[in-house]
Every structure is written in structure tokens, then in C-alpha cells.
Image (cartoon, rainbow, N blue to C red):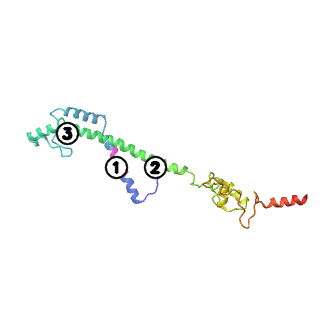
Amino acid sequence: MAQTKLSRGAEWRLERMLYRLEQGSLAINKLDDKVLRDLIKRAAISSHPDGFSSSSRLGDGGRGQSDSTPVESAAASREKPQRDELSKRVKHIESLITFIDVAAHEIHSNIGEIYRVEEEKAQRPVQTTPCLVCEAAPAEIAGYCRADYDVWRNYGNPDRLRWEMFKKQTTSVDGLLMVPKCPPPADGRSARRGPWKTGVQQDLTRSGSAL
Ligand SMILES: [Zn+2]
């Protein structure tokens, strides 16, 4: 992977993570079949009455059973029969090992998710708004797709709102067309197409005079 220039703070974060990973993998590598097999075996044996005292707790420095009075021991064994300290520790180790696996998977799935999102973002086309007339093609010029813009221009730039209603055949609540007829060209504009086409009248006049 290409080396990226990082800030001092980021470089320190990276160093810390790499250090943790190194320490972690060194520690994990020490946990092999032999070590775990031995632990399981010890836990199985210690579930017998002569195992560790049930009065000692995790992290209390391994207090021996001689510290507890016979009364305490009797009370403890009545409260938590068969709760052996060693097998509890082994179970704790077991869940921590599961934790390592879960954590590693969680890290990788998060990394994967980051790349997936980035990739999706890169592939997504630039956000476009649809054409106000056909509502399908992306708007390119003045809110219309190129084709609809050209048509609108050819009709002499009629009032946009009326033009859009006419083209979309927008109806009122009672089902009547809001703009049933093609709106006229804008002031100072002439239509090259449609019913307001200036040439239509001229053509008619011409053909009329020709007769
Ligand atoms: Zn369009």
C-alpha cells in the first residue's frame, strides 16, 4: 500500500495501533493447542472437591483456601456448590478468546464497510433533478432536458408554468385540463413550431394569394 503522509498526531495513533497489534499477536501466538489443552484438563480436574477454594475471587491475587474459616467455607460451598475458581477462570479465558475472534471480525467488517461505502459513492452518478416537462430525463438547461428545452424554444419560449402544464396535460381536481391550448410565445419571441408558428399564417396567406 502506498505510504501516505500523516500528521504527527495521526502518525502516533498509527504507531499505537501497530504496537497493540504486535503485542496482541505475540500474546495470541503463545496460546496454542498445548497450553489450552492443559488448561481444560486442569479445569476438569479442579471441579472435584479438592480444587481451588470457592471463596477466592478472580483478581484477588489467588488467596489460598487456608484464609477462610471452616464456617465461611461451609457457607460458601452451600451458596455456590461446584463453583470452582479454576474452571471459572478457564471459562473466562474461553470467552476472552471468543472476544478476540469477534473483535478481529468486527474490525475487518468495519474496514470492508468503509471501502464499500466509498466505492458506492464513487460509482453513484452526479445527483440530477428530472426534467420539469417529461420528468424522466435529467434536467440540463433551465430545468428541462435538452430535447424539451429545444421544443420549448421552438414554440417561442412560452410561459414556463403554462407550458409545463400544457405538455404534462395537468388537470384540475374536477378533471379539466388546466392549459388545454398551447400557450402563446413570449413577448418578442416567435414560434417556429406549433399553432403559434409565424410561418403558418404566412404560408396560408402565400398559398391564398397564389390561388
Ligand atoms: Zn424532458
117 relative position to 72: left or right: right
Given this view, does label 2 or label 1 mark the residue nearer the observer?
A: 2
**In the figure, residue 152 lies in which quadrant?**
bottom right
| Helix, strand or loop for disc 3 | helix
Earlier in the chain: of badge 2 and badge 1, it is 1
Earlier in the chain: of badge 3 and badge 1, it is 1
| Helix, strand or loop for disc 2 | helix
Earlier in the chain: of badge 2 and badge 3, it is 3
Given this view, does label 3 or label 1 mark the residue nearer the observer?
A: 3
**Do residues under tags 2 and 3 come within 8 Å of each other at their CB atoms?**
no
Q: Amino acid at mark 3?
A: Glu
User: Residue 193: x and y, percent?
Assistant: 76, 57
Image point (76%, 58%), residue name: 195
Q: Whole-Å distance between the Cαs marked 2 and 3?
A: 43 Å
Q: Which residue is mark 2?
A: 114
Q: How many C-alpha atoms fall within 10 Å of the one at disc 1: few (<14), some, or many (≥20)?
A: few
On whether residue 77 falls in the magenta region, the answer is no
Q: Which residue is mark 1?
A: 20
119 relative position to 53: left or right: right
**Do residues under tags 3 and 1 come within 8 Å of each other at their CB atoms?**
no
> Which quadrant, please, contains the C terminus?
bottom right
